[in-house]
Amino acid sequence: MTDGGSSSISRVQAWILASRPKTLTAAAAPVLAGTGLAAHHGTASSLPAAAALVGALLIQIATNLANDYYDFVRGGDTHERVGPLRVTQAGILSPEAVKRGTMATLLAALLVGVYLTWVGGWPIVVVGLASMACAVIYTGGPYPLAYHGLGDVFVFVFFGLVAVGGTYWVQGHSLPPDVWLVGCALGALVTTILVVNNLRDIDTDARAGKRTLAVRLGAAGTKAEYVILLLAALLAPVLGFLHMGWPPATLATLLVIPFGVAPVRTVLTYTHAAELLPALGQTARLVALYGAALGITLALG
C-alpha cells in the first residue's frame, strides 16, 4: 500500500512512476553530447562525466517530483487532464510524501555537486544552485515559470546551454565556441518534449489558469514551434561540420531524421489530445538518439 491512496502497486513502483523515467532522456542526452564534444577536443574525463550524468538525472527527477506536487496543490492537475499518470493527483502518493521526495532528491544532487565543485570550481556552484532552484520554481514558488510561459526558456537554457556547458567544463575547464552550438541544439531538441506535453494539455492548462507558452501561442503557433525547434537541432551538425571543424562523421547524426517523421506527423494532424501521447514518447526517443549519435560521432572524430 502506498501513501495517500489505496493503489495495490508497491511503494517502489509508485516512486518509479513519480520519477517519470521516460523523461530522463532529456537529462542524459545533453551530457552525452557534451562528453562527446570533450572527447573530440581531447579533454574527456570519465569520472566527472559520470558525475555530471548522475547529477543531471537527479535534478530531472527532482523537477518531475516538484511538478507532480505543485501542479496538484495549485489545481493544475485535475481529472480532465490527459497524459501519463501523476501520482499525487491519482492519490498513489500523498502530497507530503512527494514533497519530501523532492527535497531528498535535491539533497542527493547537492552531494554529487560537491564532487563536481571540487573538479570544476566555483562556476559549478553557481550552475548547480541555479539548477536546483529552478527545479522547484519551475512550478513552485510565488512566480512559477511554467505558469507564466517561461517553461520553454527554462528548458532551453538549463537542458541545453547549462547542461552541455557544465558537462564540458568539468572535463575541459573551458568553453570553446562549439559548446554553445551543441548547447543550442540539445536545448532546442529537449524543448520539443515540453512542447508536445504542453500542446496536449493546452485546453486543461488554459482552464486551470496555467499560461504556458502553448496557451499563449495557441495550437497553430505551438505546432510551428515544434517544427522550428526540430529543424534547428538538425541544422547544428551541418554548421559544426562546415564552420567548426567537426569531422564528417557528425553528419551521421542526421540519420535520426526518420525517427522524427511520426511525431511530426502526429503533432501537425492530431484532432484529440490523447493522440499526442505516442508523440511524446517518440520525441523523447528522438532526443536520446540524437544526443547519443552526436556525442559518439564527435568522440570518434
Image (spheres, helix red, strand yellow):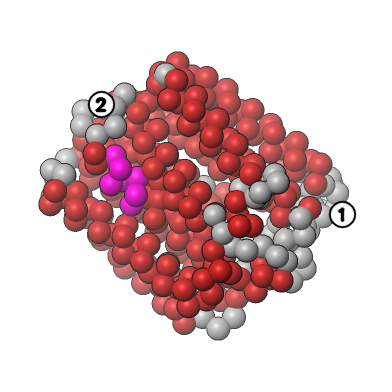
- Name the residue nearer the viewer: 254 or 194: 194
Q: Nearer the viewer, mark 1 or mark 2?
A: 2
- Name the residue nearer the viewer: 287 or 114: 114
Residue 273: image quadrant is bottom right
- Amino acid carrying label 1: it is Ser
Residue 181 inside the magenta-drawn segment: yes
Which residue appears at 25% of the width and 54% of the height?
A: 236
Q: Which residue is mark 1?
A: 6
- Name the residue nearer the viewer: 187 or 290: 187
Secondary structure mostly seen in the magenta stretch: helix
Q: Is residue 123 above or below residue 21?
A: above
Q: Is residue 38 above or below residue 33?
A: above
Residue 232, image x and y in percent?
31, 60
Please report whichever mark, 1 or 2, sits nearer to the chain's N-terminal start. Answer: 1
Q: Split into 4 quadrants, where in the image is the C terminus? A: top left
Mark 2 secondary-structure assignment:
loop
Q: Which residue is mark 2?
A: 43
Which residue appears at 31% of the width and 24% of the height?
A: 173
Which residue appears at 39% of the width and 43% of the height?
A: 161
Residue 60, image x and y in percent?
55, 43
Residue 237 inside the magenta-drawn segment: no
Residue 85: image quadrant is bottom right
221 left or right, relative to 261: right
Whole-number angstrom distance, CA of label 1 to CA of label 2: 52 Å
Residue 63, image x and y in percent?
61, 44
Mark 1 secondary-structure assignment:
loop
Residue 278 visible in the picture: no
Q: What residue span does the magenta drawing correspond to? A: 179-185
Mark 2: give few (<14), some (14-19) or many (20+) Cα within 10 Å.
some
